[in-house]
Amino acid sequence: MAVNPNMPILIVDDYKTMLRIIRNLLRQLGFTNIDEATDGSQALQKLRQANFDLIISDWNMEPMTGLQLLREVRADAKLKHIPFIMVTAESKSENVIAAKEAGVSNYIVKPFNAETLKGKMVSVIGDF
Amino acid sequence: MSVSSKVDPDLGARLDELRDTYGDTVQVEEVVEVVDSLLSTMKGDVTSADMELYNELESLAEYIHSAKAEIAQLRPDDVKEKYLSSASDELDAIVEATADATNNIMDATEIVEEVMAGLEPEISDKLMEATTKIYEACTFQDITGQRITKVVNALKHIEEKIDALVDAFGSEIDKFKAENPDPVEDGPKEITDEDLLEGPQLEGQGRSQEDIDALLASFD
């Protein structure tokens, strides 16, 4: 099934600059229906108000981290099906294992490039 | 635990009393008091073991006195006020400056992307590739920001330790400051070439280009 370029994507990061970078890279990949949140709790609020087909989230945020957001999403019957890509500078094995155990769909280490972003997106939502 | 059986029973009893009063951990400020208290209660003949203990205690008290004076001379209060807080401010300024620069780069890149839409596909593709690389490179700001935050947190930890040191040696530091006043406080001093090399000024601390132009013009 072809990926809809108009699919709603939620990007979450406490660095506004990083949100802008990810938004621009997604736009270059053809995705324009993008919403933003600056921490896990704001993201959760948006996820419960509107439909999203993909979450791309940072880990290290306050008050709610990306890992906590992931756990909340996976514990919510209405949200648990949404693919969740963690984009973070946390690159220790225990971080990746914790994210996997919490149900992450894929994991990108910062700094990353557009090719990596595209590759991870393809692995969770299909080719585009 | 009671004192060793080698120690005279009276002295041992006195040491036990002191332990009941001060506990096993005696504050630096209290050591002299403890030693004085111990020595003042000594009566009659003392055994060689007692003397050994007294000598050890006396030399310990002298050592602590000397260590206190040396730590006071290091002026931990000065390290905190002059250097640590300044280092944190400089690091914050780095994060702010790199964020500003990154946003400016992205402003310009977005303009290039807008212009790309009306160009030949061959040129447009090349520009797209270049702008993607610019966006990728801009992720450095997030990484450096996080690394600097770690350094700032480490500095805060050191600052807390220095606070504890200043609290513990406050009176010694005040005494040292009184005996060795800061030369700056004595009056104006001549500015050296070294004084003129402070690097970039923090926001609001330096002169603007307009101020500098006006200052230069005032010499004409």
Image: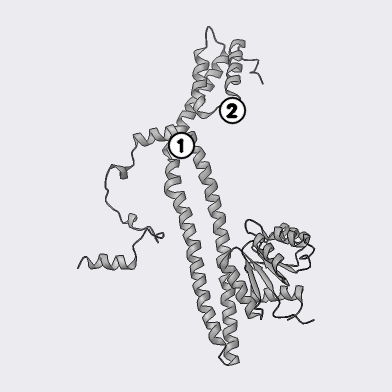
Farthest-out residue, top: B44
Q: Residues within 10 Å of mark 2 (few under 14, many from 20)?
A: few
Image-quadrant location for residue B173: top left
Which residue is rendered at x = 49% and y = 58% of the image? B92
Report how many numbered discs are placed on residues in the image: 2
Say above or below: B116 vs B26: below
Label 2 vs 1, first from the N-terminus: 2
> Disc 1 designates what residue?
B71
Which residue is rendered at x = 43% and y = 32% of the image? B171
Q: Identify the coloring.
A: one colour
Q: Quadrant of the C terminus of chain B?
A: bottom left
As helix, strand or loop, the secondary structure at mark 2 comes to loop
Please state the chain letter of the residue tagged with numbered disc 2 in the rendered image: B
Which residue is rendered at x = 30% and y = 66% of the image? B212
Q: Amino acid at mark 1?
A: Ile
| Numbered circle sitting on residue B25 | 2
Compute the Cα span from label 2 to label 1: 20 Å
| Numbered circle sitting on residue B127 | none
Residue toward you, B108 or A42: A42
Say above or below: B171 vs B14: below
